[in-house]
Image (cartoon, rainbow, N blue to C red):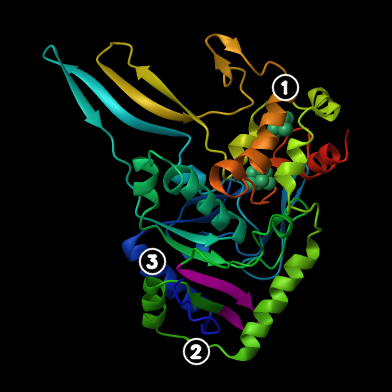
């Protein structure tokens, strides 16, 4: 593993962060959290001032609001995830045009050059999950995803706060950012601790003007902040042996309870940073001169998702919910050697009827 120079870092002021941001803007399309339409969303941003500093997201099952708070990185992850940029909800793969009686084919390449700024531990882990799904554990690596992901510069931020729907401590993905970043920011009382996680991150960090070497007290403060975030979160279930324990409940009667509550609206799969299922569609213009082949998000909650030879093998809503939960916490481990859930809690917040996956797991495990 690359030497990240642990225990080494620099303290910068807000002006130092601005200098870093301007340097990133010179070479990258910077994507960061931003206040938009009353929520925090990952968006392309032009300046550091666009970040939602001093805002705090409060979340509960089926509930989201923003309030004011003291400090800068006072919120957790945005409503959407980096999936929106690396595996967009609609991606044109190919165009076909008619011209002088001939067909012209254009293969569309994905363009990125992204810097993901202010990425929290759960979302960084979600990138590792998507990397395995699309590239590392995929017998046919996805060139679209790979092109967008390769070279993306990642600036991570350690969380000092958690909402009631966060459960990264249960899933072992946070709140501490451990790897997969180029630069890591931790907000401290007297400024921001910057640490490098890659050679290019270190080179950028060394080139910054106004900084001072971080001392032991700064790393102690970092631990203290992480402990504060950890203390907010409860451990909901034990992940050791979870796939086998769930496999043992495949025929449990409990699954049927979900039929009365779940609307099969797909909101959970759309908001999830790791749900990757897609469909490929053809879109023709009305003059029949041009056709596009597009890739769009799909969902295991859609009635057509499990339709094979015109027969839907998952007609009941509870069978679709079981498929979703079992994929996240059991089958995914068989396929990709990790869980498909990073404990971000988005599916809990954005479920219109407040179904809490943590509670469902506990109930399924406790059922006959
Ligand atoms: S669990 Fe909630 S968000 Fe997911 S499909 Fe059912 S009602 Fe929609
Ligand atoms: S299943 Fe829910 S909590 Fe887990 S990663 Fe997806 S949205 Fe986040």
First in sequence, mark 2 or 3: give its number: 3
Which element carries disc 2, helix, strand or loop? strand
Q: Is residue 188 above or below residue 173?
A: below
**Mark 1 CB lies closer than 8 A to ligand 1:** yes
Q: Is residue 232 above or below residue 90?
A: below
Q: Which residue is the site of mark 1?
A: 317
Q: What distance separates the C-alpha of mark 2 from that of mark 1?
A: 57 Å
Q: Name the image quarter holding residue 61.
A: top right
The answer to whether residue 149 is left or right of residue 363 is left
First in sequence, mark 2 or 1: give its number: 2
Q: Residue at x 50, y 45 (%)?
A: 83
The answer to whether residue 17 is left or right of residue 69 is left
Residue 259, image x, y percentages: 79, 23
- Say which of marks 1 and 3 sits in front: 1
Count of numbered badges drawn on the protein:
3
Q: Magenta stretch: give its range.
A: 182-192
Q: Nearer the viewer, residue 237 or 32?
A: 237
Q: In which quadrant of this rendering is ligand 1 seen?
A: top right
Q: What distance separates the C-alpha of mark 1 from that of mark 3?
A: 46 Å
């Amino acid at each position: 593993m690359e030497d990240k120079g642990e225990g080494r870092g620099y303290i910068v002021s807000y002006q130092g962060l601005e200098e870093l941001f301007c340097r990133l803007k010179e070479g990258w399309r910077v994507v960061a959290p931003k206040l938009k339409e009353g929520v925090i969303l990952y968006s392309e941003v032009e300046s550091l001032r666009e970040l939602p500093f001093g805002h705090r997201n409060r979340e509960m099952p089926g509930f989201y609001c923003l309030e004011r708070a003291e400090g800068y990185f006072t919120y957790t992850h945005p409503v959407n995830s980096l999936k929106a940029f690396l595996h967009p909800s609609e991606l044109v793969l190919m165009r076909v045009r008619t011209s002088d009686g001939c067909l012209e084919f254009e293969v569309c390449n994905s363009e990125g050059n992204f810097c993901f700024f202010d990425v929290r531990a759960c979302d960084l882990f979600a990138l590792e999950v998507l990397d395995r799904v699309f590239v590392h554990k995929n017998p046919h690596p996805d060139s679209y995803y790979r092109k967008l992901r390769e070279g993306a510069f990642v600036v991570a931020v350690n969380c000092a706060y958690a909402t009631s729907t966060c459960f990264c401590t249960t899933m072992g993905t946070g709140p501490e950012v451990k790897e997969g970043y180029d630069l890591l920011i931790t907000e401290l009382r007297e400024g921001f601790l910057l640490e490098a996680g890659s050679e290019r991150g270190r080179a950028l960090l060394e080139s910054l003007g106004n900084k001072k070497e971080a001392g032991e007290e700064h790393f102690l403060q970092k631990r203290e902040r992480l402990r504060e975030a950890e203390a907010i979160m409860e451990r909901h279930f034990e992940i050791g042996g979870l796939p086998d324990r769930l496999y043992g409940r495949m025929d449990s009667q409990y699954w049927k309870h979900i039929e009365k509550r779940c609307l099969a609206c797909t909101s959970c799969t759309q908001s999830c940073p790791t749900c990757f299922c897609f469909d490929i569609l053809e879109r023709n213009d009305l003059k029949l001169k041009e056709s596009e082949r597009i890739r769009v998000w799909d969902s295991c909650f859609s009635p057509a998702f499990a339709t094979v030879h015109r027969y839907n093998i998952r007609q009941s809503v509870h069978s679709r919910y079981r498929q979703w939960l079992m994929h996240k916490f059991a089958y995914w481990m068989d396929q990709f050697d990790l869980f498909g859930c990073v404990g971000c809690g988005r599916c809990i917040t954005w479920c219109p009827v407040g179904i809490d996956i943590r509670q469902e797991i506990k109930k399924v495990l406790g059922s006959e």
